[in-house]
Amino acid sequence: MRARLHQRDRIADGVGEHRERTARRNRRRRLHHRTPELARPRQGGRYVRDAEEHDARPDPIQRFQQEGHRHMAPEVSRQRRRRDPAQRRAEIIAAAESIIADQGVGALTHRAVAQHAGLSPGSATYYFETIDDVLLAALQNSVDRFDDGMTQWATTFRNADHATLLAGLVDSVMVCFGPDRNQMMVAYELTAAAMRNPALRPLAQRSIEISVARLSEVTDPDTAAALTATITGQVLNGLAAETPPTRTEVETILARVLGPAPKS
């Protein structure tokens, strides 16, 4: 009987020691799995946290900057996504001009503009409540661009001789059938729209005034007005024709309007 009790106690002790060893091993595994860089084996096979190593860990923000993490912080991401209102307006106007150049004023809608600009229709209506507002902004942009171009042109030819001035006038017409064709299509489409839209008329008139004023810097006011009317007609007819006029044809007409070279 005593032998059986002694054997049972030995078995119980063995099971207890086995469970204790297993528990210690599992604790070491969990600690190593969670924070391997903070665990260090010591005497007896135990793992303990090293406070010095923990304090040496890099700051999370510093680690983010060093590693170049591809996921932005939410507030940074929102700032990147938020566009400047002036930029958004410029994108809408550019989209409107592109549509006008390709399809005309009649194709201009908030949905078409938004789709072309890669925006939602609500974004287009937020910045421009009506299509007339879009047309007005597009015409204003066109007039400003024309004003800048004419100012540079007048500065270049202000002191030019007769032959150079005539060549400059011809160049200003011929470029409308080439690199500047889309811009001139927009300008003339919007000017034509002013015949039915009173809100556009002041800007359309402003375009004529700019031309006369800048040409008056290189010739007399009457000739400047005549050149403005002639060039407007030449460009309009050339854009509408299947084949634009040749340089010689443009030069012949402008030479008549400009008149002969002054006698020295």
Image (cartoon, grey):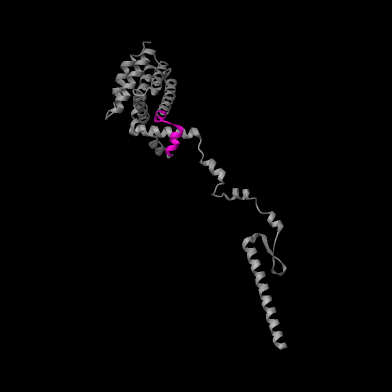
Q: Nearer the viewer, residue 230 or 261?
A: 230
- Picture coordinates of residue 208, whole percent (x, y): 38, 19
In which quadrant will I find the N terminus? bottom right
Residue 175 magenta-highlighted: no
Q: Nearer the viewer, residue 41 or 249?
A: 41
Residue 121 magenta-highlighted: yes
**119 sits left or right of 250 in the view:** right
Q: Which residue shows up at 61% across the image and 50% down it?
A: 63
Q: Which residue shows up at 29% across the image and 25% down it?
A: 237
* Residue 132 visible to an observer of this rendering: yes
**239 sits left or right of 120 in the view:** left
On the image, which quarter does residue 111 sit in? top left
Q: Is residue 245 above or below residue 92?
A: above
| Magenta span | 120-134
Q: Residue furthest front?
A: 1
Q: How many marks?
A: 0
On the image, which quarter does residue 256 sit in? top left
- Picture coordinates of residue 11, whole percent (x, y): 68, 81
- Picture coordinates of residue 69, whole percent (x, y): 56, 50
In which quadrant will I find the C terminus? top left
User: Which SS type dominates the magenta stretch?
Assistant: helix
Q: Which residue shows up at 34% across the image and 16% down it?
A: 226
Q: Residue furthest left?
A: 242
* Residue 220 visible to an observer of this rendering: no
